Image (cartoon, rainbow, N blue to C red):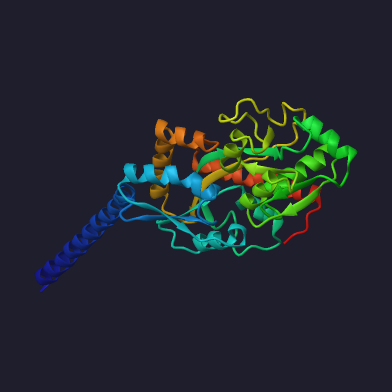
Amino acid sequence: MIKNIIKTNSYIIFTQRLVTTFQATLTVFILACGTIAGPIAAQSYPAKPVRIIVPFAAGGPNDSAVRPLSQKLQELLGQPFVVDYRAGANGIIGTEYVAKSPPDGYTLLIISSSFTINTAMYAKLPFDPVRDFAPVSSIATGDILFVVNLVVPARTVKEFVALARATPGRLSYGSSGVGGSLHLGAELLSFTAGLKMVHVPYKGAILALTDVIGGHVDAMFVAGPAAIPQVKAGKVRALAVASRRRAPALPDVPTFAEAGFPGVEVDSHYGILAPAAMPREALVRLNAAIVKALATTEVRERYVTMGMEAASSTPQEFADHIRNEMVKLRKVVAAAKLPLQ
């Protein structure tokens, strides 16, 4: 009897040890798989086509900024990067769409300065610009030019400012709409130089530029891709570039700082966002591909012809830029006393 009990207890102890050993081995195996899964997921991303949402109509600056990059990413990562347009409400409709998309890295967003401007101009947005997105990388900066029609008797910014001060309320400027970067650029000039001009908002920058060319509006701030061909064709006169450096396509046009108005600085900054909670490994892989794409001579030269400059970044650097721009633009809107939408 005692021998049988000892044998039974020994069997039970052996079985328990076996189970414990199996559980420990299984745990190690699961942890190892989890460790390996991340790199494997990163290496396989993207495993299907990726959509890049443009929250504006086709043919605009956002579309122009993303095209060279999307084509190069397809070459580097072996999957199509498809441009998809979701226009409306100054970019808010497309932005909300991405914010509510699955955070798997297959729906991305191309943003410009309008993304941060909206946070200053709208009392309430259907998304949180910080919490709902994962910054991937900056991709380019775009020049914004200050142009006048050929009838305006000013060939420098100082001459234009003198004319505007001598005739308050008579000079007009166009924009792509209330609260856009082009509108804020003109408001910044007016605030800095103490000018009083008439704002004529349009439903798009091209419509406003057409009226500047036609002499119906005196001046406007306008993105380089739209303005540079018209300047070179002699249809409008460029007085300044609202960037920190001169536009490579128009090297003779001074910056506002060089023209004597260093406080006037506004440009278009483009970048890629993903829905928050995109897998970290996939985000890092995508960022590396963007940095590599933007370093190629082919892509950089294409941006130059459009009045843009390739500008990659780390995800954290792009996140910092967005936050800094939000703070700056809120101050500009407050100083200009623009009503919230």
Say if 264 sits above or below 178 in the image.
Answer: above
- Name the residue nearer the viewer: 292 or 327: 292
What percent of the width, then of the height, locates residue 341?
72, 62
What percent of the width, then of the height, locates residue 32?
28, 51
What percent of the width, then of the height, locates residue 238?
67, 34
Q: Is residue 250 visible?
A: yes
* Residue shown at the point (88%, 41%) measured from the top left: 167
- Name the residue nearer the viewer: 72 or 24: 72
* Residue shown at the point (26%, 56%) measured from the top left: 24
Locate the N terminus by quadrant. Answer: bottom left
What percent of the width, then of the height, locates residue 294?
44, 36
- Name the residue nearer the viewer: 110 or 193: 193
Q: How many marks?
A: 0
State left or right for residue 231 relative to residue 165.
left
Q: Is residue 327 visible?
A: no
Say if 30 sits above or below 144 in the image.
Answer: below
Say if 54 sits above or below 328 in the image.
Answer: below
State left or right for residue 56 relative to residue 220.
left
